[in-house]
Image (tube, coloured by chain):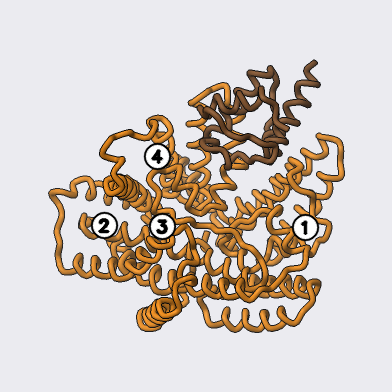
Amino acid sequence: MPFNSFQFVAFFFIVYCFYLLSSHKWQNRLLLAASCFFYGSWDWRFLFLIFTSITIDYFCGLKIHGSDDENVKKRFLILSILVNLSILGFFKYFNFFISNFTGLIDYFGLSIQPRTLNIVLPVGISFYTLKTLSYTFDVYTDKIKPARSYSDYALFVIFFPLLLAGPIMRAGELLPQISSKRKLRLDEIGEGCYFIFWGLFQKIFIADNLAKVVDPVFNSSAPYDCTKIILALYAFAFQIYCDFAGYSNMARGLGKCMGFDIMVNFNFPYFSTNPQEFWARWHISLSAWFRDYLYIPISFSKREWGKWGVIFALMITFIICGVWHGAAWTFVLWGAYQGFLLVIYQLFKTAPIKMPILENAFFKKIWYFSRMFFFFQLISIGWLFFRVKSFSQALQMLRSLAGFLSNLQFDLLSRAMLIDLVFFTIVLVIVEYFQHARKDLTILLKAPFPVKLFVFMALFYLLVIFGEFGTKEFIYSQF
Amino acid sequence: MVSERLKKVILKVLKLGDFDLQGSTKAFQVPGWDSLSHVSILSAIEKEYRIRFKISEVLSLNNLEDLQLLVNKKVENAV
């Protein structure tokens, strides 16, 4: 039951009607039951897994907080980490490790029969594992007090708008919103509806249509046409962004309609001019998780190494971030590439260049857009590792890209791809340009009434006429 | 309350001439204090006060007041 399905619309409508009529206590009970139903609609067996995590972490949180003995605290923290990572490891990485292990054995001339299992990956497992782990880490470091109510804690983990693909909100931000009474304001509900609509537009009009530009290129085999790879990479950059930011916007909107304040997960990432800025704007809740629970502990433990400690921590963090996205070497490569960009940026970043010509507002803008454009190329190359099906496909495509000046062919198909790319992204670029310039995500809502009416009618028209209503799954919910 | 000595160390690492550092100030509110400079700041504080932080202590910090209290506790224990 993805957000972009008619079943979800019916589900949310029924839940919301009861929600509006209920007291705070019953609202939480309703949300917990609805979230269980929502998650169980994929496979009811997943509920056993998520409730194992919930129960263990709830119990560990109380034990960690209730003890003054550092060893006891550590033991329960380790128990929580072991249980959560074992579940994630088994369901997500078991077959990957087995196939790599047998490959290694084969390499040394020995042959064994690999025993892989037909494991179904529980949806959203990567997201809720990080969420529950952050809870025990925060209780351990005394950042938060543990949840006293089991049902409040269970709702924190399984809350349906955030369950499949985040944002990975911390207990310190979400638990107080669950345990205290929420105010429903008409303007917040209006904003919520806007975020749901814009998220749906990003997913159905932009992302799912761009998939038709991207998929044929990545599903084909070598030799590759350099022009088509470039166009497919640009299209994928916008597809993955709109797919994921669309989901996050819808989650935020659903939350707002129910009186929750859900964090912003994407803050105009493609307006970034360097990798550090990009990771502060892209999938903010995930980068903050990796920063707080992985990068800082690693870099701090290696502080004697000076700059090398930072480089080591960055590379390890981003390789793990890559592996988190999927059990494949291509994701490892993608993570390593992102880490490498950050390391290079750290090593060579200098004070802002002071040139008299940049005092001029026009040239200042040109300089900013040039840096943004250059960095967008680097990010798009990174998406190649993320999207390819295999390591060898990545190499073949990179080889084709390397000779791009001698290999550019602009045939009819490339022209059609370019037209689709421009048509399905132009609205996003215009809307985000204004949102970014005014630093306001709700700028469309604040426009004068005739402008607002025209824009929303145009968006609605585009959505109805060109929208892909095939309930395509969100990419990130498959992680 | 953040001591002048602590402020001086932080501002020196961040190469800031002057910035109003309060107890309630959070790292992200200070220009240049990001995840990459965070470790350099903590290392400089360790050197200045001849103390050593644990990772769990570093992770528990919410604002500058927490940092000041942690430094005070460490200095007291070291004496």
Residue indicated by mark 3: A437
Subunit under mark 4 = A
Q: Residue at x 27, y 51 (%)?
A: A397
Are discs 2 and 3 located on one and the same chain?
Answer: yes
User: Looking at the picture, does residue A243 appear above or below residue A14?
Assistant: above
- Please state if A87 lies on the left or on the right of A234 as rendered: right
Q: Check disc 4: other Cα within 10 Å, few if <14, some if 14-19, many if 20+.
A: some
Q: Check disc 1: other Cα within 10 Å, few if <14, some if 14-19, many if 20+.
A: some
Instruction: Give the number of the disc on residue A55.
Output: 1
Chain shown orange: that is: A
Question: Foreground residue, A77 or A191?
Answer: A191
Instruction: Give the number of the disc on residue B55.
Output: none
Residue A332 in the image, given as x and y percentages of width and height = 45, 45
Marks 3 and 1 in Cβ contact (< 8 Å): no
The amino acid type, in three-letter code, at marker 1 is Thr
The amino acid type, in three-letter code, at marker 3 is Ala
Mark 1, secondary structure of its residue: helix
Q: Earlier in the sequence, mark 1 or mark 4?
A: 1
Residue indicated by mark 4: A341
Q: Residue at x 58, y 60 (%)?
A: A166
Residue A252 in the image, given as x and y percentages of width and height = 58, 66
Disc nearest the viewer among 1 and 4: 4
Marks 4 and 2 in Cβ contact (< 8 Å): no
Residue indicated by mark 2: A229
In the figure, what tint was chain B given? brown
How far apart marks 3 and 1 lie (CA) works out to 46 Å
Are discs 4 and 2 located on one and the same chain?
Answer: yes
Question: Foreground residue, A450 or A465?
Answer: A450
Mark 3, secondary structure of its residue: helix
Disc nearest the viewer among 3 and 4: 3
Marks 2 and 3 in Cβ contact (< 8 Å): no
Residue A433 in the image, given as x and y percentages of width and height = 38, 60
